[in-house]
């Protein structure tokens, strides 16, 4: 058994232990005894478990330093919300002139229009009012359409480019609350999430830094 890996997996399974390790609030001997007992390790493995706990605590403390930097950045970010958003997934072998036509019509009204191109499909994010036009243009090429979505844009400073781990930190916040991200993208200092409208209130809470 790889004791370092086993210890890290055990610790990650408990948010309270992680928080205590980050903040230096742990009795390492007591924690090591508990881990050894839970993982049914031999008495001779105790020292290795103790060392693994200390190493992982150091790793978490470094991560905690990054988190403070991330929170300071996000604290000064601004939120923009747009509701009544539709997310359509269409096959990639569409007639691209139709996509250009749709884009022109939407941009003419200065409305939301975003495209994400994948290997096998294209995702179109726009206002719900253009869903009818989208259905006319792409017909049987439409794989799926989600209505009642909300686009949340986090507008940060240029410092965003210099701070590592911002996206991973944001994803972890959504994950802890069990909130599904329908689509996500970024453009320079803008970080964009598309979520279900029912999740807007908890998202506003978790993005309040």
Image (tube, rainbow, N blue to C red):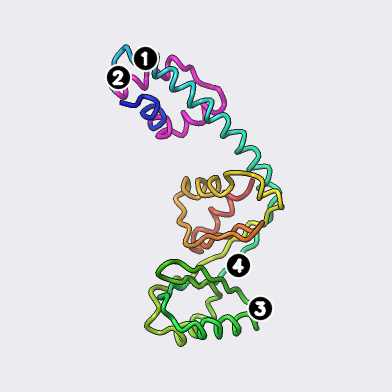
Front tag of 4 and 3: 3
Front tag of 3 and 1: 1
Q: Are marks 2 and 1 in contact (CB under 8 Å)?
A: yes
Q: CA distance from mark 4 to mark 3?
A: 13 Å
Q: Which mark is residue 110?
A: 3
Q: Position of residue 32 (x, y in %)?
A: 40, 18
Residue 195 is covered by the magenta coloring: no
Q: CA distance from mark 1 to mark 4?
A: 54 Å
Q: Determine the secondary structure under disc 2.
A: loop
Query: Looking at the image, is mark 3 or mark 1 earlier in the sequence?
Result: 1
Residue 26 is covered by the magenta coloring: yes
Q: CA distance from mark 3 to mark 1?
A: 65 Å
Please provide the residue range marked out in magenta. Answer: 10-39
Query: Looking at the image, is mark 1 or mark 4 earlier in the sequence?
Result: 1
Nearer to us in this view, 159 or 73: 159
Vertical comparison of 126 with 202: above or below? below
- Is 118 positioned to the left or the right of 37 in the image? right
Residue on which disc 4 sits: 82
Q: Position of residue 50 (x, y in %)?
A: 43, 17
Front tag of 1 and 4: 1
Q: Determine the secondary structure under disc 1.
A: helix
Q: Are marks 1 and 4 in contact (CB under 8 Å)?
A: no
Residue on which disc 1 sits: 46
């Amino acid at each position: 058994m790889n004791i370092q890996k086993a210890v890290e997996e055990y610790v990650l399974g408990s948010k309270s232990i992680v928080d205590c390790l980050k903040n230096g609030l742990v009795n390492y001997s007591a924690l090591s005894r508990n881990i050894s007992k839970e993982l049914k390790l031999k008495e001779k493995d105790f020292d290795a478990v103790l060392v693994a706990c200390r190493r992982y605590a150091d790793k978490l403390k470094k991560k905690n330093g990054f988190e403070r930097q991330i929170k300071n950045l996000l604290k000064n970010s601004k939120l923009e919300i747009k509701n009544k958003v539709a997310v359509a997934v269409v096959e990639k072998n569409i007639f691209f002139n139709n996509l250009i036509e749709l884009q022109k019509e939407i941009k003419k009204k200065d409305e939301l229009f975003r495209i994400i191109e994948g290997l096998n499909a294209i995702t179109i994010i726009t206002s719900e009012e253009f869903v009818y036009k989208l259905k006319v243009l792409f017909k049987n090429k439409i794989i799926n359409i989600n209505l009642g979505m909300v686009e949340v844009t986090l507008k940060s400073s240029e410092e965003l480019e210099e701070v590592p781990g911002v996206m991973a930190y944001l994803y972890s916040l959504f994950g802890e609350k069990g909130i599904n991200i329908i689509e996500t993208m970024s453009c320079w200092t803008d970080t964009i999430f598309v979520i279900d409208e029912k999740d807007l209130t908890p998202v506003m809470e978790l993005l309040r830094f």
